[in-house]
Amino acid sequence: MTPETLVRLAVVRAYRDLSDLARYGVGNINSSAGARERIEEARRLRVLANELVDLVVLSEALADTSWQVITQALNRRDAETVQCEYAEAITEWRAAPAEAYEGIDGDARDLDTWYRAHRDDSDPVAENPASDLLQAD
């Protein structure tokens, strides 16, 4: 198991959480919730989306994608600045303790089950996308 795989599983979790929160927002749009609650829900969605972008960048950096490619994908200009912004997080993920990998098989299976329960005809056909990450190592 590599730090890259650990981050990619975190990416899958973030996608799941973002999807669940977005679905909740759709269901809650006509509720008696006030403006404050609806705005706070939308703000939480934005925060999760930003966290997702950071996790994807980390997974790509750990996979040795060039900082130039990452910088362009982020629609930024200075690769050195972007690399510096993520340097500490990359170091932390590379130094993840053994405990970070405990229970990861069960977590991946849970994410696979969630995906199969929520996918529709336009989604990629994959039975076990999270567990397949573990097989790639």
Image: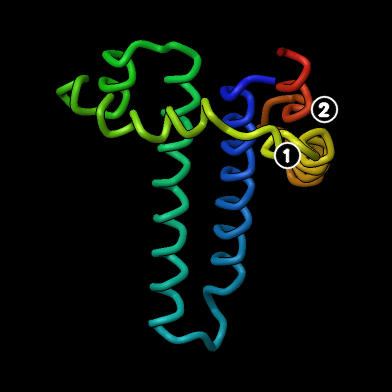
- The residue wearing badge 1 is 120
- Image coords of residue 82 (percent x, y): 25, 28
> Tag 2: residue type?
Glu
Kindly report which numbered mark, 1 or 2, lies closer to the viewer in this rendering: 2
Q: Is residue 20 visible?
A: yes
State the separation of the CA atoms marked 1 and 2: 12 Å
- The residue wearing badge 2 is 127
The quadrant in which the C terminus is found is: top right
Question: Tag on residue 135?
Answer: none
- Image coords of residue 24 (percent x, y): 61, 65
Q: Is residue 116 visible?
A: no
- Quadrant in which residue 96 is drawn: top right
Residue at coordinates 82% horizontally, 27% vertically from top-left?
127
Q: Tell me, what colour scheme is on the image? A: rainbow
- Image coords of residue 108 (percent x, y): 77, 35
- Quadrant in which residue 1 is drawn: top right
Q: Is residue 22 left or right of residue 115?
A: left
